[in-house]
Every structure is written in structure tokens, then in C-alpha cells.
Image (spheres, rainbow, N blue to C red):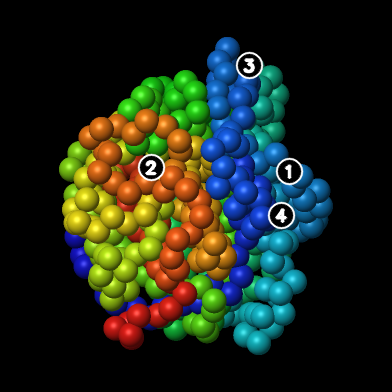
Amino acid sequence: MIKNICAPAVGIQFHAGLSAVGETPQQLQQHLSSSASCLSSVTGYISGQQHWVGAYTQALCTHVPADLHDYDSRNLRFALTALQQIEQPLRTYVAQFDSRRLAVIIGTSTSGIADNEPLIQQHFEQQSAQVSHQKQEMGCLAKALKQYLGWQGIAYSVSTACASSAKAMAAGQRLLNAGLADAVLVGGVDSLCRLTLNGFSSLESLSAAICQPCGIARDGINIGEAAGLFLLSKESAAVMLLAAGESMDAWHISAPHPEGVGAAQAMQAALDMAGLSADQIGYLNLHGTATRQNDAMEAKAVAHVFQDYPVPLSSTKHQTGHCLGAAGAIEAHICVQLLKDQTWLPMHMDTQIDPELAGLNYVRHAQLEQTVTYAMSNSFAFGGSNISLIFGTQVPCSMP
């Protein structure tokens, strides 16, 4: 692993998140402070089967500008709906900058493929179908958002499976600190589609019920969908993106290193970059997918990095589902919001914990007992692509 170079923190000027837990800060707190799940049981994604998913059930924007027609998809409308929550203040804020120095970096794993799935099925059924490939290209979301905003800077997408949007945030921080942009729109969007549900079903990784992160009876994941967007700049903000620690296991194409070596490296690299010790982290959002291997290795990695410090932690995937390329973004949004609110922490699922993982300090009560200054969020992807982000309401004195 290459150790991260310490880089200055960047400010999160605006942020928005849409997922199964809703779209407002009040909905976020309400659902993540409750034991009642927001997941829903659906059919139609896998032939003859019913599955639990984290579906966004509220309305998406209905108008897409004519010049974005080639990119139009549910994924794009998801992104635009999130953007519109912060669009007015965002446009006012970036008016101070040259449009050539405004950038967009978006993480995704599905792009707009859900809209083409019925057409692809027609094709395989020997029916005439005109498939628009543009809307499912990985780079289309970043291009579309850049065009929608009228910006002229760098725009690209990151697609590293479940680490995609967290890596987009890290890339945005690097872009700012390299002097290549004055403000960067970062985040991630992924929507439910047959491709991912059938893919994880073929891996026998889908749970038969609501997933149980770190539970003794855990049997797999629930797929979710989400959109999370953040505007980053070098100016201070109420919450800062302090650090991103990254590592690569290269252990197995779909399984993590069983001892959590890469996961531990990513968390430690983030702490080193932020100039923090482990006992300064007030909350840790676990990757916590509820698969046997992921939860076991992450628990070992946490125990290694945090040693005897009982960091409060939880997985939120039993409420949002695993949002794949958008998971890092929606979980970052959760961390940023709780740092702003300072009244609550996301509860871990009320389930019997696997005795082998029981040594961790799972959040069982949402009420915040002491101020949280720094929060960490983990995202670990297929192929061993790992990243840990650290957010804070203060910049450590040791940071440049």
C-alpha cells in the first residue's frame, strides 16, 4: 500500500441525500433512530422471486432539459432531484468562480442501465429495439450534471463498485488541493435494476429477509438505491472532509481479505492523513453489508485499528439497503448530517450479534451522549478496493 500524503481539509459547502430513509434531515434522523426498517419487499427484478430492497419511494423530478435528452434515465432524474435540493444556494456560491474551474466527479456502478433493460430483453426476444447506449455509459452522469449546471471544468465518473462514490469524494479533495478546480460537485448515484439483483443472486449473496449486519443469522445483503451529492471547496464549512485513506487488497475478485488487512490499512491511512488518533473518532459508519465474510473481516480490522478504544459504530444498510456505487455517498451524507445535528447517532440493527463480532461498541440508542467532532465512514468494494473517509467539525492542528 502507498501511504497517503497529508493534504489540507476541504469544506462541504452543501450536501443532499436521497435514499430509502427519505430526503430531509428530519426523515434521516427519524428512520435511522428507529428499529423499524425502511426496506420494502418487491417482485419483478428476479424471475419468480421476491426480495427486500432499499427503494426510494418519493417523487423524482419530471422535467429534464431538452439538451440532456440523450442522457435521460431514472438515474439522471435521481441525480437532478438531489441536486435541486441545493441548486439555488450552490449556483449563488459558485458564481464567484470561473466556470472553467468548476468540476464534477460522480461515482456509480449501474448508470442508466435500468432504462435499457426492457429494450435489451426485447432484443433477446428477437423483437426490434433501439437501445440508447449513451444513458448507460459510466461517464454520462458527470457529463450531464456539468452540462445542466453550465460548468466548463473537469467532469468524469468513478466506477469501482461499492467504493465508487467515496472515491469520487477523495478525488474531489485531491483536485482542489492540486489547484485544478475551485469547487467540485462530488457524490454518487445508483438506482435499482435487474442487472445488480440478478448478479448478486447468482453469487448467492442476497438475503432472504431484511439483512442483519454483524448478526448471528446474517445471510447476505439487500440492494438499495440512493443519490448523494456534495459541493466541496477549499473554504471552511460547518463540516469538513478531512481525509481519505485508500488501499487495495487484490485478494479475490468478490471476497475481502479474511483478516481485513486492506480495510485496516485504509482506516489507518485516513487517520494518518487527518493527523488523528483512533480514540478521537466519535462515530464509525461500518461498511457492514451483512455478508458472512465482509462483517467478519471488518470487525477484525476495526479491532486492530481501534485497539482497546470502544468507538461507537453501526451499519445503516438495514435501513438504506446496500446502495452499491452510491453507498459511500449516502453514508457520507449520514455522517455529515449527524455532525451538524449533534443530537443523535444511527442505531445498529436490533438483532442478536454474532458472538465472534460482539466485542464492538454497536450503537443501541440513538440519543447522542457526547459531542462528536470526527466521524469515519468505510466503503469496501469487490476486488479489494477499500476507502475510509473522515469528516470533522474541526480541523486538527496537525493538518497543513
x%, y% of residue 80?
A: 70, 56
Identify the secondary structure beneath mark 2: loop
Q: Nearer the viewer, mark 2 or mark 3?
A: 2
Q: Is residue 149 visible?
A: yes
Camera sees residue 158: no
| Residue designated by label 2 | 288
- Amino acid type, callout 4: Thr
Q: Nearer the viewer, mark 4 or mark 1?
A: 1
What residue does disc 1 label?
58
> Label 2, label 1: how many angstroms apart (C-alpha)?
26 Å
Q: Judge left or right: residue 362 versus residue 101.
A: left
The answer to whether the residues at label 4 and label 2 have Cβ atoms under 8 Å apart is: no
**C-alpha gap between disc 1 and disc 3:** 33 Å
Left or right of 192 in this view: 258 = left
Query: Which numbered disc flags the more N-terminal residue, 1 or 3?
Result: 1
Residue holding disc 3: 125
Q: Nearer the viewer, residue 330 or 135?
A: 330
User: What whole-number distance in Å separates the C-alpha atoms at marks 2 and 3?
Assistant: 39 Å
